[in-house]
Image (spheres, rainbow, N blue to C red):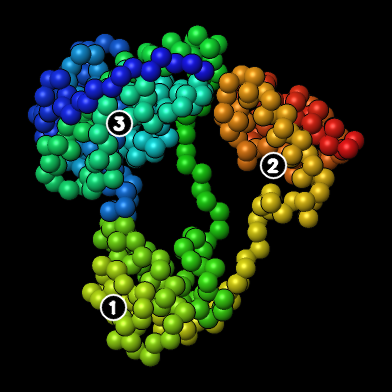
Amino acid sequence: MNVEIHPSHLVERPEGGVPPVIDTPAALERSLGVLDAADGPIAIDTERASGFRYSDRACLVQLRRGDDPAQLVDPLAFDAQAMAELQSVIGGSEWVLHAATQDLPCLRELGLRPHTLFDTELGARLLNLPHVGLGGLLDDLMGVHLRKEHSAADWSRRPLPEDWLAYAALDVEYLVELRDLVERLLDEQGKLDLAREEFAAEVDFRPRVKDGEPWRRTSGLSHVRRPGQLRVVRELWRERDRIAHDRDLSPHRLLPDRALIAAATHPSRNARELLDVQGFDGRAAASELRHWWAAVQRGRASAEPIELHPRHTGIPPHRSWNRVNPDADRRLHAAREALGEIAAAHDLPLENLLPPRMLRQVAWEADDHPSEGHIRARLMELGARRWQVDLTAAAVHDAFEHAVED
């Protein structure tokens, strides 16, 4: 769609100055009073310490309502009762978030849950805008340019530097105004109802749990070709995870994945030789050497069965379908083509029209002549929204039928 692009100007500080961190009961009480007295939606964002800490908990919660300055709440300074008081003030209002699924899990850990929300990032995706990140949207729609240099910072450190606090406050400074612009564009494009359906579904968002053994996601594992070496990787991964959990540190800040692979694939007769192995490095390679060497020894001594190539659960990767299930492969390609036409006609990204994993699932499961009703029901079971099913079910059915005929 065509959107008027505004010339940008750099904003480095909130208009009212950098707000202080709220980390005492008295300051929180004043903040709750400010939020409760204001009207309208509440802009919310969080900062985490991903890549630094084991947990993905919120280390700062930013809130802004009305014309008042942002409230920067330090959740690490408060107990569950204090967070319950915050929830009682904000829970019934519309929350405005950008990329809500990134923030909702850590907010839920604090006992903070929205009743309704508006996701400006998801709204921008449904509009098929060229930029959907917060910085890009503010640049394009409001002519506001924010620097994003602190997005990957260690937000668990205390005290937080003032320029970090400015950055955090600016993340909610324009969010409600951006919400109104995105809502207007959605309404103009006839997409507001489907956006509301998406936002309602996000309220109960839970991250998908990854299947399988987590240690098998170690980067470089494909280079490990013997069962004994795999056992060493597994034991090192478990030891690293245990230490990281106990110290609330990111596992990769102790040892990178390449160190696990190097220790498993290169011979060493003792801890000193292990430390000399090329690639076995990292912040804790030497300081925790006795733990790493003990894990290597456990892996070498273990007789626990282990599969070099564990059997895949669920449907196989779609790139292999032309070999293992040609009928499903034809159904999938035919449906993709049909959905591509619908996405273009409605100016929607294909992945938002219908998530690819859902299409693959119904294509794999379908018999030669599945009814449209069956496809509709199965898509709903898989979590598709009503609007997605209404736009796609008939086209998927017809595509499957044509695939069988061809």
Which quadrant would residue 283 be assigned to in this image? bottom left
Q: Where is residue 52 shown, x and y percent of the image?
A: 28, 53
Specify which label sits upstream in the sequence, 3 or 2: 3
Does residue 133 appear left or right of residue 307 in this picture? left
Position of the C terminus by quadrant: top right
Question: How much space separates mark 1 and mark 2, taking CA atoms?
Answer: 46 Å
Identify which residue is drawn at 40% across, 66% down.
257
Q: Where is residue 335 shown, x and y percent of the image?
A: 74, 33
Tag 3 secondary structure = strand
Identify which residue is drawn at 16% across, 35% down.
165
Residue 289 - label: 1
Identify which residue is drawn at 20% across, 13% down.
67
Specify which label sits upstream in the sequence, 1 or 2: 1
Density class for disc 3 (Cα within 10 Å; few <14, some 14-19, many ≥20) is many
Examine the rendered structure and indicate whether residue 247 appears above or below residue 262. Answer: above
Q: Where is residue 103 shown, x and y percent of the image?
A: 36, 35
Question: How much space separates mark 3 and mark 1, taking CA atoms?
Answer: 40 Å
Residue kind at label 1, given as amino acid type: Leu
Residue 361 - label: 2
